[in-house]
Image (spheres, coloured by chain):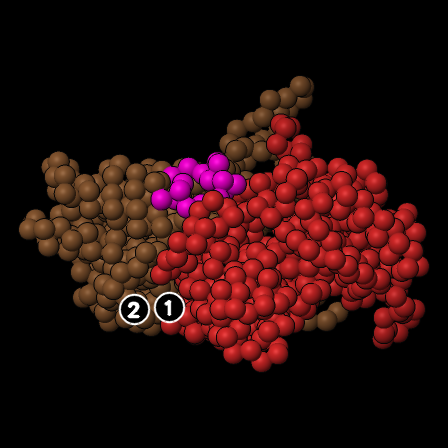
Chain colours: A red, B brown
Amino acid sequence: MDELLKVAPRPTGAGEMFQLLRDGRPRTRADLAVVTGQSRSTIAARIDALLASGLVSPSGEASSTGGRPPSTFRFNPAARVVLAVDLGATHARLAVTDLAGEVLAEHAEGIAIADGPQAVLARVVELGRRLIGEAGRSVGDLASVGVGLPGPVEHSSGRPINPPIMPGWDDADVPGILGRALDVPVLVDNDVNIMALGEHRTQWPSVDHLLFVKVATGIGAGIIADGSLRRGAQGSAGDVGHIAVPGGSDRPCRCGNTGCLEAVASGPAIATDLAALGLDAADGADVVALVRSGDLEASRAVREAGRRIGGVLAACVSMLNPSVIVIGGQVAEAGEHLIAGIREVVYRRSLPLATQHLRIVASRTMGRAGVLGASAMAADHVLSAAAIDSLIA
Amino acid sequence: MDELLKVAPRPTGAGEMFQLLRDGRPRTRADLAVVTGQSRSTIAARIDALLASGLVSPSGEASSTGGRPPSTFRFNPAARVVLAVDLGATHARLAVTDLAGEVLAEHAEGIAIADGPQAVLARVVELGRRLIGEAGRSVGDLASVGVGLPGPVEHSSGRPINPPIMPGWDDADVPGILGRALDVPVLVDNDVNIMALGEHRTQWPSVDHLLFVKVATGIGAGIIADGSLRRGAQGSAGDVGHIAVPGGSDRPCRCGNTGCLEAVASGPAIATDLAALGLDAADGADVVALVRSGDLEASRAVREAGRRIGGVLAACVSMLNPSVIVIGGQVAEAGEHLIAGIREVVYRRSLPLATQHLRIVASRTMGRAGVLGASAMAADHVLSAAAIDSLIA
């Protein structure tokens, strides 16, 4: 028996069986025996262990053609809670959810990410404890924390790597700081990745290829391919904000290059364009307010930003062939102008095979995409087959 | 018991167990019992079924600390053969391999893809039958056929979709035509996807994120992400040849747009540039010959093409964060000039996190990448867990 064989996982253990129950539907022991190919006695022992953990609960009786009706069991998402944290450059949104992403308590407030990790994460811990209480639960019920950050994150370590709009956060040990305060596993990812996950899980669960694009202070994308989030080798996949815009521009970007998409189509970039025309715009919120007030210059500028984004997304469509592109982030709140500009260029610049079934739509979860995705990431971690196996071993 | 439960697969059946053996290493029944968590009697029955199929064979005895040493078993890749077909615009390469991709017989010749599917595929059948004989096998040993085509393919149907450089092939029933002649399953994919698969399986099996870029009559890419080929919603993922080149150009492309990468950096595009300088170049082969003869204008033109490709690949690096980019195809045979141009722009235009561990290298399998990938695709299909389960049911 060599090392490789020793560490190989045992399939269809209790953890693997639990994955079948995560859809929330009640099943009998016989149902589970058929699906897993395991013996009735093995199934019975695993159900007992899962019942003891609280993660599975009895859910009544199945219909029967005679004799005593068999008991059914299902996933109990209320067994534990997770803390979901979505940090932006200037805002924080936190939610306490159950293990199926149901929001139990929620809070949003303005922050300055530039205050640095110690100050910002101390506030996260304070708010998280308060929300757990508001949800009627105790800190002992907390299973894990999911965090989205507005910059590149090395997913394996949970640390931000040279984040351009997060001064003081480079290589900060976010999982360590939050983990010491809350004593549970902490998962960290780029904010756009968790927004993609949140939108995909809650709005497009049957779509296998989806691109989520956030247009705000920064511009970034999260990639769902073959049903799963794809992070790339260092976790920086989807970093479309620093792709050079086709057609060119010399405007300097904070990354050190020139002509990046973020430098010409983000909220602040549009505001700069409008300020140069004499309008009162300093950031993305001002741009959205101007568009909503009916300002034609602002609408025109947002549409032009959409075209620039469309130029980069046309390349992404050729590269990834998604069937849905979801546009979210603050600037998307300006309404149809942004998406109209994006559609104009993507449909002109891509091959027919890639666009014939392509939909380009506005985010449906809007401001909530991040916390819903952070919740899913945190719950996935503690409910994985391996985590369940070690929990009930 | 509802419909969903009825159709769910049984894990760790014989097919699943067979996947453990595909690495070619000998294992005892006891080894397999430990890894799968199945009983010794279940394992023994499955081994018997796999021995009867010929896909598994006895491989001697394990060492023993006393008593009769236990028998070992391993995958027998010689049980069947597959036909691997790599069709380009002007060439065909065919190989007969065993089920592990070992080439048993091989042939390459010039063809004209524009002769259409009936003529080209009839030649494929003729050559395939001859190669099976040369390999010392009979047509009855053929398990499946894998085909790469130089254009977009709808992977689910195996049909080319509006392929720009394959006149007469739109919606051609390639699996039907070859399947009727050879009476086995036929898998079809874009030639670049199978080249990516061939290079990944044989040269970079432990790399999870790899981009294979073919620079020839056309330009395209195959994407390996999280260890698997990603085809996108309609199978057109990786179609980088029709992305607009940053910096712009008005040169018309055969796709109907202008300024596509393929229009300014493919073999014929470089040849056009050189012909305008008075050099004798009509296609990519002429370009490679000129570079090899030491022509400085040709080397300069190939390097400039590399820079244009690098501009598009910089966007792909931001989007996908691969750890290896492999450059193949005819123009890559011109040597270091192409890759030097690519590296120059990719390392300048991408964020540090995405490039710090990025390698950009020449294909090691070169002309053989396609047939090696077609062989892997064809073998994977007949050796999947589901295929094995139905074979020995």
Residue B153 percent location from the top left of the image: 37, 64
- Do the numbered discs 1 and 2 sit on residues whose CB atoms are within 8 Å? yes
Subunit bearing disc 2: B
Residue A379 percent location from the top left of the image: 75, 53
Residue found at x 43% / y 54%: A251
Residue found at x 25% / y 46%: B304
Q: Is residue B272 visible?
A: yes
* Front residue of B75 and A5: A5
Q: Quadrant of residue B19?
A: top right
In the rendered image, the quadrant that contains the C terminus of chain B is bottom right
Instruction: Indicate left or right for B201 with A270 as reference.
Output: left
* Front residue of B261 and B333: B261
Instruction: Indicate left or right for A104 with A321 as reference.
Output: right
Q: Secondary structure at mark 1?
A: helix
Question: Does residue B35 sit above or below B15 in this rendering?
Answer: above
On residue A349, the disc is 1
Q: Residues within 10 Å of mark 1 (few under 14, many from 20)?
A: many
Instruction: Indicate left or right for B210 with A216 as reference.
Output: left
At label 2, the amino acid type is Asn
The region drawn magenta spans B345-360
At label 1, the amino acid type is Arg
Subunit bearing disc 1: A
On residue B257, the disc is 2
On residue B320, the disc is none
Q: Secondary structure at mark 2?
A: loop
Q: Is residue B19 visible?
A: no
Instruction: Check residue B350 for magenta coloring.
Output: yes
Question: Does residue B243 sit above or below B101 in this rendering?
Answer: below
